[in-house]
Amino acid sequence: MPPLDRLKDPNRERRLFGRRYLVAIVLIGIMLGIICGRYFYLQVIEHELYQVQSDRNRIQLQPIPPKRGLIYDRNGVLLAENIPSYSLVLIKERVPDVDATLSELAAIIDIDEDDIRKFKRRLRHRRPYQAVPLKLRLTEEEIARFAVNRYRLPGVDIDAQLIRYYPQGELLAHVLGYVGRINEREMEEIDTVNYSATNYIGKLGVEKFYEESLHGTVGYQNVETNARGRVLRVLERHPPIPGADLVLNIDVELQKVAHEILGNERGAIVAIDPADGGVLAMVSTPSYDINLFVNGISSKDYKVLRESPDLPLFNRTLLGQYPPASTLKPILGLGALHYGVVTRRTTVYDPGWFQLPNDERVYRDWKTGGHGNRIDLHQAIVESCDVYFYDMAVNMGIDRIHEFGTRFGLGERTGIDIDNERAGLLPSREWKREVKGSHWFPGETVNVGIGQGFMLTTPMQLAVATAVLANRGERKVPRIVRTIDGFPVQAPIKPKVEIANDSDWDYIRETMEGVVHEIRGTAKNISNNLDYRIAGKTGTAQVIGIVSHDEHDPTQLAKRQRDHALFVGFAPADNPTIALAVIVENGEAGGRVAAPIARRVFDAYLRPDKVKPKAPVKRRAADGSEEV
């Protein structure tokens, strides 16, 4: 065995140790360099980034919802306001277990499956740290119960907000529309930043059409929060810009009278100020309480409305399309005078029926036996002689009827400041060729001559056309909104209806006065005790076809198969301040049913002192307080 000193080499060990020491020093130096470099990078180069991220753990940017603009009628009556409401909200990022938290909340507050389903749907369309409502309109008892258990429910809070309320309920449902929860489709279309603090959006009517003005602009604030997300203090605040207040042309008292007059009937009333096209009243019955829709209508309530045979959700003033019947006769008569088809002295023999040459079909007059030997245009309008207008329409021709009708806005949308308006139908050769794939026949012109056949109009169109007659050709686009934050709303300008002889305007007005004030007028029953003059025209539109010369008893027909009753008119006749159109579905006779309704609306507007007084209505004073 060799000696021990021969196995150990001190020099070699020193060299080996030195090399290992050097490597260790280098590695340690490299590691310290990396650490220092990283530290320098984080603390110096990326200082601002990580400072912001650090602040985000305690500082939150919160959007502030703008106050939605209020809506008033022309006399200052508040129609749409904002009232305080409390909601239970969750911030997902601060809730450890959403499902477990929902279970705990359900044990404290009455939360049903529908609330949870809607909540989970809203979660999919939210911004980070955005509070998502779980239950709306909490009661005081529910708020108190939550307050006691708040300490063990991180990320859950009570949110106070303003929600829409409509004091008039169903009275203005088809005018105002309503606001509702923002749905998925709307979320894709709106400016998500401006709506970041808003859960509601206009769905129908004025609320939808003027959404941009009513909503306002979102504000924001930087707040410091604790570990549980509770706000400790506000660091910076930029207040929101409130939505604009709207003043409508609607007279809520006139609206109320018109609504009460129609009562349980299915129908519509539209009243317009001929001077500027302002819509004074716009009633569709039956109606519904729009407050039901603000926070989401229940399935039960919605089913009742949707399945009602009376269609309360259907806005008859803009969507209802009805044959105008004899209410069209003043316009057709004026057109015939303009084109020289008839003169004021032109007469027609009326045996009670009309036939086209070489045609076996008989077109009957509404009056059995006819109106007399020789009927002129004045008598034809006053007594609503169908035979005169059958003959006149054939001589005038569908082309000129269509051309002249378009001047009054028939067959096209009026342009009113509400969406979902129908255009009605003013038939023409081209229309029938494109839609029906057929030629136009003379018998179809005969039907159009009394506002029947293919022809359809909406109550709004009839009111606008009547206002044109009242204005001697001046055509105004109807407007519901009068001002936005005090600035007048400008309506588009339509061309004036020009006719060959300007005095024919007065002639037609006089014939329409005769409808009400002459002994044989079809609306003479409403002239009693009148201290002003009304120019009007009755109409009765068939709902089901009747074979020529067949006698029928309306009382033997089902209610919904009876004729529609119509009336159009303006007053005072010599200086009109109101023009209106009335339709009562299945009302049977325009002179007996629709005309008396129109008389009461005229009285309510022109002679309000003679109308039965109503309960006082709260109005908003200039200083914002309420006054009676």
Image (tube, rainbow, N blue to C red):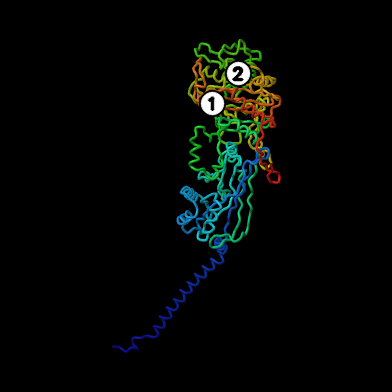
Q: Amino acid at mark 1?
A: Asn
Say whether marks 1 and 2 touch (CB < 8 Å).
no
Q: Nearer the viewer, mark 1 or mark 2?
A: 1
Q: In the picture, which quadrant includes the N terminus?
A: bottom left
* Alpha carbon distance from label 1 to label 2: 19 Å
* Residue 412 image offset from top left, x and y in percent: 58, 29
Label 1: how many residues lie within 10 Å, few (<14), some (14-19) or many (20+)? Answer: many
In-front residue for pair 201/135: 135
* Residue 407 image offset from top left, x and y in percent: 62, 25
In-front residue for pair 314/475: 314
Query: Can residue 434 be seen by looking at this rendering?
Result: no
Circle number at residue 384 = 2
Q: Quadrant of residue 352?
A: top right
Task: Pick whichever of labels 1 and 2 is earlier in the sequence.
Answer: 2
Secondary structure found at label 1: loop
Q: In the picture, which quadrant includes the C terminus?
A: top right
Secondary structure found at label 2: loop
Whether residue 83 is situated above or below residue 153 in the rendered picture: above
Whether residue 204 is situated above or below residue 57 in the rendered picture: above
Q: Quadrant of residue 600?
A: top right
Q: Which residue is mark 1?
A: 586
* Residue 587 image offset from top left, x and y in percent: 55, 25
Q: Amino acid at mark 2?
A: Ser
Query: Can residue 517 be seen by looking at this rendering?
Result: yes
